[in-house]
Image (cartoon, grey):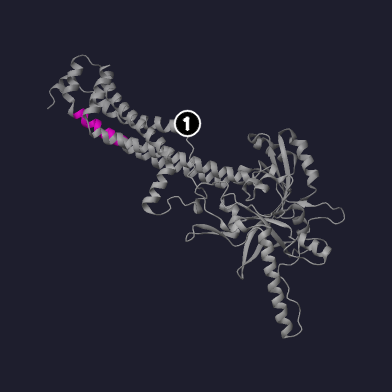
């Protein structure tokens, strides 16, 4: 009992020990906050990556893919049907997006993805990233009358406004189409006055549903018809304007865009060429992952297959580039992957889990988190060296007291226990205070951000950069536990050498010490 009493007395009377306690407190609090924020960011990032990638991806060779999706899906069910919840065929090819805004032409390199609107939403979170509520409930490539989100439905609080989407839909298309017809009529009249000439051609005429309507009605009217629908990533057609504190869109649902893709080589034309068609924007995709939002464009699967010449005219069998597979239990991903790899030839098919597809990014995040933890743990190590120095000072100053204790019968282990209990007390108090401070900071981290922004007048956590409107945090009990126990262990280890020195003092020499 006397060991803990003396340790507590030294702790109360040694104000220099407060510096060590504060160091441990700050180190523990910092580690808890950093790990919680890193865990939150990692979770959000993985959720959004997984939202576009299915549990298992079955890929074919190159851009031409492989034929007969139904036959391949039936074979996949035969091999791993007990684990599979759903599948959908996909075509993915590089392409070029072209659109006009206020007389200027914009070209964007994109990844064009053909999806089956009946099954794609069932294997991924694709639908919940769309900006029209009806499309989130049931995916459609038809243009809606109105009702597109003018406030981000994923983060409605403190969201950046999107006033352009208020006029999106058929209302915008009718106004735009009417103005376009008037401009073409004026241009035609001007050309007639100048002499006989060809009627000016609309660069965005024909293609898709519009082409079919034109063949049927012999005229395509932008105010009443749409081309085949396309869903475009938000980063391709919008930008954040700090001066207006709003997202401004260069193209909105109702506008027409042009897509150019490399066509599939055939016996008639062995060399790949490019083909362009006009599509109508029907919705905007926003996963809040800039890599996806600034690259992905989605069109109906059958349209893209026809667009690229991937349909065999004699058999009507189409090629696809991949099959997305959703599992009943995501944890079975590696098991299903290995089963499929054993059943299909590795030379012809690539089979991956979604973690395999993003392994480089996930590895980089894990490595960054580990290195950051090591660096921040040095804060607690510095506190440990402070405890070591303080204890050596105490041993020197209390040499006579140690001699009295040993002459009264205190054993070596008893004297050593005094300083070990002192170190344990320092570590426990510092770790406990750091635990409380860290958890409190994590709980109110967004409120702290708001206060800092109001004081500095600048965005501390800009949603337009980080794609999160609130700082995501996840407190992992296991991580908190090892941080607290590790800090206490450092404090105790720092007291071992001074404790051994005190325990080895001879009573007579200690009493004679001046």
Residue occupying the point 19% across, 29% down: 396
Dividing the picture into quadrants, the one containing residue 167 is bottom right
Q: Residue 132 at x, y = what percent?
A: 64, 50
Magenta residues, dominant SS class? helix
Mark 1 lies on residue: 478
Q: Is residue 80 left or right of residue 252?
A: right
Q: Nearer the viewer, residue 64 or 104?
A: 104
Q: Do we see residue 27 in this rendering?
A: yes
In the rendered image, which quarter contains the C terminus? top left
Chain part drawn in magenta: 384-396
In the rendered image, which quarter contains the N terminus? top left
Residue occupying the point 29% across, 21% down: 417
Residue occupying the point 65% across, 47% down: 133
Q: Nearer the viewer, residue 417 or 51?
A: 51
Q: Residue 478 at x, y = what percent?
A: 47, 31
Q: Is residue 391 magenta?
A: yes
Residue occupying the point 77% across, 65% down: 220
Dividing the picture into quadrants, the one containing residue 202 is bottom right
């Amino acid at each position: 009992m006397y060991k803990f009493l003396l340790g507590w007395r030294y702790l109360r009377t040694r104000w220099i020990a407060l510096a060590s306690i504060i160091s441990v407190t700050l180190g523990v609090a910092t580690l808890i906050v950093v790990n919680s924020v890193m865990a939150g960011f990692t979770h959000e990032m993985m959720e959004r990556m997984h939202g576009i990638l299915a549990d298992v991806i079955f890929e074919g060779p190159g851009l031409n893919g492989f034929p007969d999706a139904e036959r391949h899906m039936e074979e996949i069910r035969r091999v791993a049907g007990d684990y599979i919840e759903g599948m959908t065929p996909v075509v993915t090819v590089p392409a070029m997006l072209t659109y006009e805004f206020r007389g200027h032409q914009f070209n964007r390199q994109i990844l064009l993805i053909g999806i089956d609107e009946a099954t794609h939403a069932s294997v991924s979170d694709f639908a919940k990233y769309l900006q029209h509520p009806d499309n989130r409930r049931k995916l459609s490539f038809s243009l809606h009358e109105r009702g597109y989100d003018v406030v981000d439905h994923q983060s409605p609080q403190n969201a950046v406004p999107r006033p352009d989407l208020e006029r999106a839909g058929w209302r915008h298309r009718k106004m735009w189409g009417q103005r376009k017809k008037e401009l073409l009529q004026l241009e035609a009249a001007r050309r007639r006055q100048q002499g006989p000439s060809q009627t000016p051609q609309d660069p965005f005429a024909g293609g898709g549903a519009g082409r079919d309507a034109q063949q049927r009605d012999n005229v395509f009217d932008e105010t009443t018809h749409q081309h085949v629908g396309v869903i475009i990533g938000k980063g391709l057609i919008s930008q954040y304007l700090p001066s207006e504190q709003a997202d401004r869109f260069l193209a909105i649902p109702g506008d027409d865009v042009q897509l150019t893709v490399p066509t599939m080589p055939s016996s008639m034309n062995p060399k790949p060429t490019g083909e362009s068609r006009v599509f109508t924007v029907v919705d905007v995709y926003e996963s809040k992952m800039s890599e996806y939002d600034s690259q992905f464009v989605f069109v109906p699967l059958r349209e893209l297959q026809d667009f690229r010449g991937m349909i065999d005219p004699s058999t009507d069998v189409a090629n696809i580039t991949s099959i997305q597979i959703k599992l009943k239990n995501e944890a079975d991903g590696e098991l299903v992957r290995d089963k499929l790899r054993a059943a299909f030839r590795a030379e012809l098919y690539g089979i991956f889990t979604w973690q395999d597809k993003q392994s480089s990014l996930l590895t980089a995040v894990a490595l960054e988190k580990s290195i950051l933890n090591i660096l921040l743990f040095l804060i607690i190590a510095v506190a440990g060296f402070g405890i070591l120095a303080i204890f050596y000072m105490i041993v020197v100053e209390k040499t006579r007291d140690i001699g009295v204790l040993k002459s009264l019968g205190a054993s070596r282990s008893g004297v050593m226990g005094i300083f070990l209990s002192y170190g344990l007390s320092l570590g426990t108090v510092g770790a406990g205070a750091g635990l409380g401070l860290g958890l409190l900071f994590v709980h109110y981290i967004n409120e702290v951000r708001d206060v800092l922004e109001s004081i500095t007048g600048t965005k501390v956590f800009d949603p337009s950069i980080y794609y999160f409107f609130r700082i995501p945090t996840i407190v992992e009990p296991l991580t908190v536990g090892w941080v607290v126990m590790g800090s206490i262990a450092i404090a105790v280890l720092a007291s071992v050498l001074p404790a051994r020195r005190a325990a080895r003092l001879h009573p007579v020499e200690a009493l004679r010490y001046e």
